[in-house]
Image: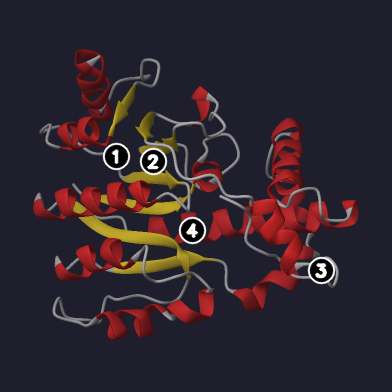
């Protein structure tokens, strides 16, 4: 296994096609980051939001690449585009970082992501929000051009992911508008990532697993000639990710069972929302 992983990583420098994506663990992943081979221009990490091991994996990746001076920037799903830590000093406090990223407005808990974000800031690496601004969401929901971006089967897969991700609670009439939001988020993150490209370095994108998948997510918005790689963290017992949608699978321990659908039903007791809501991890 180690030889297969090593060979796949070396292919980042210019192999025409990668071999079947190897599975590894967080320790094996860190070993590969030590290989003195070219990194992709954009490296996408896909997480399960309620898996602490995934945020630890992201933090360790940030620290390793920053220490090697190969990290151009970090782009987050968890903050809106237009917000960045670029103007902050490495000594900035967590409060200053949250204010720079307008973290509270995005609605994500700070504690799980503080080690990831602060690792970059303290290394002098800028962190950028990549997500679609909330003020644009209602407009996007009415824009039909998003429906043509993906092949029909991939578009239906997105709609199905919205349906299942919201526990079959959404009216059918909302599936397409919500899928448009998903695509617009991916397009926004991709645009922010491209704007941070630096020669000889990689831009690290951190987002939920569904956002980084090759066939439906952020990679579909990146130029064909741009070298991008996808690494997906998968907790034991989680629904498997189709092999063609990632280059790396990082296996992590199971997370405690949680009934996300029960939580969602409780929040929606007064009826289905008219604005996008976070999907279950």
At x 10%, y 53%, the residue is 67
Question: What is the x, y in percent for residue 210?
Answer: 56, 44
Q: Residues within 10 Å of mark 2 (few under 14, many from 20)?
A: few
- The correct choice, above or below, for 131 with respect to 252 in the image is below
Nearer the observer, disc 1 or disc 2?
A: 1
The image quadrant where one finds the N terminus is top left
- The correct choice, above or below, for 243 with respect to 279 in the image is above
Residue behind mark 1: 40
In this rendering, the count of numbered labels is: 4
Q: Are marks 3 and 1 in contact (CB under 8 Å)?
A: no
- Mark 3–mark 1 Cα distance, whole angstroms, equals 45 Å
Question: What is the x, y in percent for residue 6?
Answer: 20, 21
Q: Secondary structure at mark 2?
A: loop
Q: Are marks 2 and 4 in contact (CB under 8 Å)?
A: no
- The correct choice, above or below, for 19 with respect to 94 in the image is above
- Mark 2–mark 4 Cα distance, whole angstroms, equals 15 Å
Residue behind mark 2: 226
Tell whether 236 sits left or right of 200. right
Residue behind mark 4: 189
Q: Which mark is residue 269?
A: 3
């Amino acid at each position: 296994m180690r030889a297969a992983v090593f060979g796949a990583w070396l292919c980042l420098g210019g192999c025409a096609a990668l071999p079947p994506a190897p599975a590894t663990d967080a320790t094996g992943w860190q070993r590969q980051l030590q290989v003195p081979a070219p990194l992709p221009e954009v490296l996408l990490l896909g997480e399960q939001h309620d898996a602490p091991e995934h945020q630890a994996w992201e933090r360790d990746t940030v620290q390793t690449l920053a220490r090697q001076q190969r990290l151009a920037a970090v782009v987050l799903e968890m903050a809106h585009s237009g917000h960045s830590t670029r103007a902050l000093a490495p000594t900035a406090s967590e409060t200053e970082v949250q204010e720079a990223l307008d973290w509270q407005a995005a609605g994500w808990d700070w504690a799980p992501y503080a080690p990831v974000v602060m690792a970059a800031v303290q290394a002098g690496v800028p962190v950028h929000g990549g997500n679609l601004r909330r003020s644009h969401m209602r407009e996007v929901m009415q824009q039909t051009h998003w429906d043509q971006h993906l092949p029909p089967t991939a578009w239906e897969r997105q709609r199905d992911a919205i349906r299942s991700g919201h526990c079959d609670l959404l009216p059918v009439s909302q599936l397409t508008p919500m899928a448009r939001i998903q695509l617009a988020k991916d397009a926004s993150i991709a645009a922010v990532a491209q704007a941070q490209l630096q020669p000889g370095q990689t831009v690290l994108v951190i987002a939920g697993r569904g956002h980084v998948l090759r066939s439906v997510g952020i990679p579909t918005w990146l130029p064909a000639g741009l070298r991008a790689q996808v690494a997906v963290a998968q907790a034991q017992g989680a629904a498997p990710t189709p092999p063609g949608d990632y280059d790396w699978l990082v296996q992590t321990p199971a997370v405690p069972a949680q009934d996300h659908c029960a939580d969602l039903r409780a929040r929606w007791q007064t009826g289905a929302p008219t604005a996008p809501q976070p999907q279950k991890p």
